[in-house]
């Protein structure tokens, strides 16, 4: 991650060309992007049938490490890795195999001409600046969900990407699942009748074993200034490093981290760009070091149906899934997809069923294919922006204690 406005950044922007315009962010950090399509894209190599796609990975922790392994399984070469923590940087080098270029300055990675696409798997507060810099450098991008930290950042990201011809796949990986396409077909066929209520949820029990609760003192292994980057300054805190998802400076908590998937299911399958009204409630009921809630519920009104998104990491009884309640039948998403008729109580025979499976590998495959074909990916930038906007609205409601209205077409609060 680059120093905020250091010489490395200035030299990079000069090299990549384009007319720069400052963008004001909530954190007070200024970044730049081209007002016209990126000239670097014109130098993009044509990838032949026997050529291997070359990938750079920025952020080589959990998700970045997974992406490295998956990309290599799909036949890509990971030629460069970047992380501000030496432990994770070394992990990325091992997973990539061979002798990849390794750095803690992401602009140095983007400046290389032996990279076709990049994966961005950093904390959310870095997504905006890194994506803009990546497409300015003419790189195709797979950016982990949630796309943005704020609604305004998302708008800026859409504008910057569409000023280029770069492929950008947002990590809402359910979009690459054929089993979800079948669910959408069932809904659109009318088999469920009029759907008036959708319930989606994700429950996990971290009360006995918090996977991000480490307080290991790794200050000598992390470049803390580069981790903080565009966020407000805070002295080193191991919790903030390991559990950044649960701090408002770096992310939006469970609402955005999990909502990026579950609210995507709602809006995609129901054919909506965004809710009309959102109200959220919850709190910190167990994890005293979290700033964001450990249990939270969002009620989203889409005018002709209501959606309820519930997420809590203190009990795993409900697990992960959803239910689409129609006047004629119900679609239940759990370990498998099942359509149940109205009348009586379960257990009863399903009208039809099909398997559920993890879509991550298919999503990576789609990204790599789009680098070659230049086709639109399954989860383009607008999709990632619209779904995370719904989650951001939930956080705005939660933090303000008020119901919020939204005009999805104009992208403005009501």
Image (cartoon, rainbow, N blue to C red):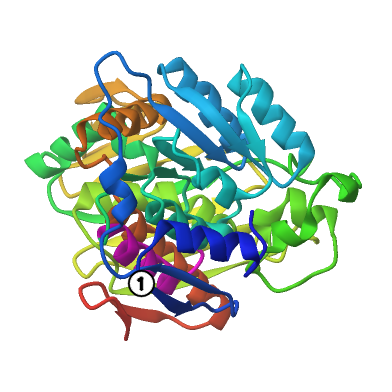
Q: Quadrant of residue 85?
A: top right
Residue 413 % position (x, y): 34, 83
Q: Which residue corresponds to the image point at 42% horizontal and 57% vertical from the top-left?
A: 16
Is 408 placed above or below 350 here?
below
Indicate left or right for 308 with 230 as reference.
left
Q: Residue 271 versus residue 376: which sits nearer the camera?
A: 376
Label 1: how many Cα within 10 Å (few below 14, some 14–19, many 20+) = few
Residue labelled with disc 1: 19
Q: Residue 286 versus residue 58: which sits nearer the camera?
A: 58
Residue 49 % position (x, y): 24, 16
Q: Residue 384 versus residue 311: which sits nearer the camera?
A: 384
Q: Quadrant of residue 159?
A: bottom left
Q: Residue furthest bottom?
A: 414
Query: Does 376 lie within the magenta span?
Result: no
Query: Does 160 lie within the magenta span?
Result: yes
Can the viewer see residue 207 in this picture?
yes
Could you tell me what secondary structure mostly forms the magenta stretch? helix
Q: How many marks?
A: 1
Tell me the quarter of the image containing the C terminus: bottom left
Stretch of the chain drawn in magenta: 149-162
Q: Which residue corresponds to the image point at 32% horizontal and 62% vertical from the top-left?
A: 158
Indicate left or right for 172 with 402 as reference.
left
Badge 1 element: loop
Residue 268 % position (x, y): 25, 49
Residue 305 % position (x, y): 24, 62
Indicate left or right for 338 with 248 as reference.
left
């Amino acid at each position: 991650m680059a120093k905020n406005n250091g010489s490395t950044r200035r030299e990079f922007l000069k090299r990549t060309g384009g007319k720069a315009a400052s963008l004001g962010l909530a954190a007070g950090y200024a970044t730049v992007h081209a007002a016209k399509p990126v000239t670097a894209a014109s130098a993009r190599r044509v990838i032949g049938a026997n050529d291997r796609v070359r990938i750079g990975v920025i952020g080589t922790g959990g998700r970045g490490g997974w992406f490295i392994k998956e990309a290599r399984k799909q036949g890509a070469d990971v030629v460069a890795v970047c992380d501000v923590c030496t432990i994770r940087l070394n992990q990325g080098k091992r997973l990539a195999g061979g002798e990849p270029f390794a750095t803690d300055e992401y602009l140095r990675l983007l400046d290389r001409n032996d990279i076709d696409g990049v994966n961005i798997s950093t904390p959310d507060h870095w997504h905006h600046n890194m994506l803009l810099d990546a497409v300015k450098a003419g790189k195709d991008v797979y950016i982990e969900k949630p796309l943005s930290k704020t609604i305004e950042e998302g708008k800026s990201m859409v504008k910057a990407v569409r000023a280029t011809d770069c492929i950008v796949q947002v990590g809402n990986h359910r979009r690459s699942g054929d089993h979800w396409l079948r669910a959408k077909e069932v809904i659109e066929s009318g088999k469920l009748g009029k759907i008036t209520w959708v319930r989606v949820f994700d429950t996990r029990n971290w009360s006995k074993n918090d996977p991000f609760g480490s307080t290991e003192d790794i200050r000598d292994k992390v470049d803390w200034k580069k981790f903080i980057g565009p966020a407000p300054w805070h002295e080193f805190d191991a919790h903030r490093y390991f559990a950044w998802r649960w701090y408002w400076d770096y992310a939006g908590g469970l609402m955005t981290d999990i909502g990026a998937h579950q609210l995507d299911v709602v809006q995609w399958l129901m054919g909506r760009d965004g809710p009309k009204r959102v109200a959220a409630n919850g709190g910190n009921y167990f994890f005293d070091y979290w700033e964001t809630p450990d249990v939270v519920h969002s009620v989203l009104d889409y005018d002709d149906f209501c959606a309820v998104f519930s997420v809590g990491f203190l009990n795993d009884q409900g697990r992960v899934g959803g239910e689409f309640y129609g006047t004629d039948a119900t679609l239940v998403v759990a370990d498998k997809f099942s359509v149940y008729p109205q009348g009586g109580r379960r257990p009863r025979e399903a009208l039809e069923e099909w398997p559920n499976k993890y879509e991550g590998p298919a999503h990576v495959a789609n990204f790599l294919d789009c680098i070659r074909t230049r086709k639109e990916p399954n989860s383009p930038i607008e999709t990632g922006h619209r779904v995370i906007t719904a989650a951001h609205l939930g956080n705005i409601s939660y933090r303000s204690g008020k119901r919020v209205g939204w005009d999805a077409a104009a992208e403005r609060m009501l």
